[in-house]
Image: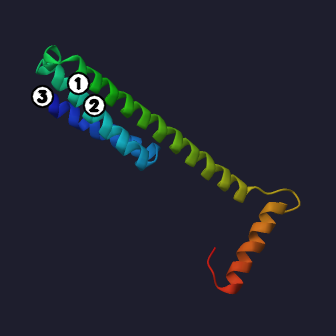
């Protein structure tokens, strides 16, 4: 019963997350949470936490901290990429009452120069 409920819910949330964000950010996050909750669930179900030494607990905590650090780096990188791409698209679409702005004219001149010599920009 649990698997028949959890798997469709997992797939629905995964697909909706892929529609909202970058796949290269969403997929590792979902995989890490799936594995992390699987490990914690296994520790609880099989009662392994009672037999763990301090070293094993420490290694589990260090592993969880590395996973959280990876999430932080992945999310900040994704936000930076989205911000840069939005800035570039805003710059391309920006127009003034006099026509293209100076930066846009320079970009167009540079692109036409590349096209004249046969190199794709």
Q: Is 90 left, or right, of 31 in this rendering?
A: right
- Snapshot quadrant of residue 66: top left
| Residue lying at the far top of the rendered structure | 50
In the rendering, at what x and y percent does residue 1 appear? Answer: 12, 28
- Identify the residue shown where x is 15% and y is 28%: 2
Of the numbered discs 1 and 3, the one sitting upstream in the chain is: 3
In the rendering, at what x and y percent does residue 67 appear? Answer: 36, 33
Q: Does 63 sit above or below residue 103?
A: above
Which mark, residue 99?
A: none
Of the numbered discs 3 and 2, the one sitting upstream in the chain is: 3
Q: How many marks?
A: 3
Tag nearer the camera, 3 or 2: 2
- Identify the residue shown where x is 36% and y is 45%: 27
Q: Along the line of sight, which residue is nearer the eye, 107 or 49?
A: 49
Q: Along the line of sight, which residue is nearer the eye, 51 or 103?
A: 51
In the rendering, at what x and y percent does residue 71 appear? Answer: 43, 36
- Snapshot quadrant of residue 105: bottom right
Q: Does 96 sit above or below residue 58?
A: below
Q: Is 103 left, or right, of 43 in this rendering?
A: right
C-alpha separation, residue under disc 1 versus residue under disc 3: 20 Å
List the residue tagged with mark 3. 1
Marks 2/1 in contact by CB < 8 Å: the verdict is: yes
Dot 2: element: helix
List the residue tagged with mark 2. 36
Which mark, residue 40?
A: 1
- Identify the residue shown where x is 75% and y is 55%: 94
C-alpha separation, residue under disc 2 versus residue under disc 1: 6 Å
């Amino acid at each position: 019963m649990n698997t028949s409920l959890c798997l469709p819910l997992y797939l629905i949330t995964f697909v909706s997350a892929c529609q909202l964000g970058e796949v290269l950010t969403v997929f590792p996050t979902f995989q890490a949470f799936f594995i992390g909750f699987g490990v914690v669930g296994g520790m609880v179900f099989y009662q392994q936490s009672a037999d763990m030494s301090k070293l094993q607990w420490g290694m589990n905590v260090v592993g969880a901290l590395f996973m959280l650090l990876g999430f932080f780096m992945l999310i900040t990188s994704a936000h930076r990429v989205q911000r840069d791409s939005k800035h570039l698209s805003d710059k391309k679409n920006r127009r003034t009452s006099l026509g293209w702005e100076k930066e846009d004219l320079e970009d167009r001149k540079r692109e036409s120069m590349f096209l004249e010599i046969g190199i794709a920009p």
